[in-house]
Each structure stands twice: as C-alpha cells, then as structure tokens.
Image (tube, rainbow, N blue to C red):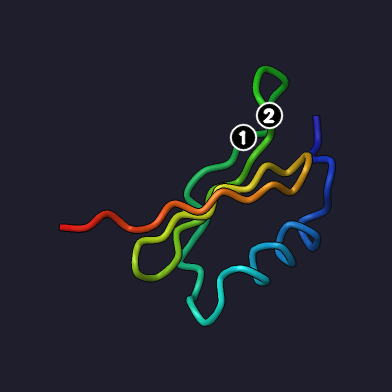
Amino acid sequence: MAHKHTQKQIDEVINKWRGKHAVEKMIAEYDGAKWPRYQRYRLEGGTIFHINSDNLKLTITPPKLR
C-alpha cells in the first residue's frame, strides 16, 4: 500500500516548518496497513519531525534537554 501523498508534498510540509535547520536523515518510515503511514525525520539539533503521510499532519518533538 502506498502513501496517499507524494514525496514532494511531504517534503513541502517539512520545508515549511523546518526553518533554517537542516534535515539530517529519515530515521523511520511505516507504509503498512495496520497503522497510519508515516515518515520520521531528525533535524540538526535533535528535533524530530513525525509526519502522517496520509493526511500530512506534522508532529514536532523538540530535542531533549540534558
């Protein structure tokens, strides 16, 4: 089963919210039928972007304080 939105649409949402922070890498992706499809990215500084690729809802997790 494929994501409902294209990678370009997903990237547009991420680029809108990431500001000047670089995306280090995609750290997880799920494209199955049991749970909602998503992609998870880590930005420089430790912020995590978790995006539901079906409805383009973005959840941002700030870096943990040490």
Q: Position of residue 5 (x, y in %)?
A: 83, 48
- Residue indicated by mark 1: 30
Q: Amino acid at mark 2?
A: Pro
**Where does residue 65 sit, x and y in percent of width and height?**
21, 58
Q: Residue at x 67, y 42 (%)?
A: 52
Tell me where residue 32 appears, x and y as whole percent. Answer: 69, 25
Residue 29, x across and y down, in percent: 58, 41
- Callout 1 crowding tier (Cα within 10 Å): few <14, some 14–19, many ≥20: some
Which residue lies at the image location 80% right of the left edge and 29% below the top edge? 1
**Callout 1 amino acid:** Tyr
Q: Residue at x 48, y 76 (%)?
A: 21
Are the residues flagged by discs 2 and 1 in contact, CB closer than 8 Å? yes
Q: Which mark is residue 36?
A: 2
- Within 10 Å of disc 2 (Cα), the crowding (few <14, some 14-19, many 20+) is few
Above or below, 32 against 66 in this view is: above
Tell which of 17 and 54 is nearer to you. 17
Looking at the rendered image, the quarter that the C terminus falls into is bottom left
Whichever of callouts 2 and 1 sits on the residue coming sooner in the sequence is 1
Question: Tag on residue 20?
Answer: none
Q: In the shown orientation, is residue 57 left or right of residue 47? A: right
SS category of the residue bearing label 1: strand
Check the image and report above or below for 39 versus 46. above
Pick out the residue farthest to the top: 34
Q: Secondary structure at mark 2?
A: loop
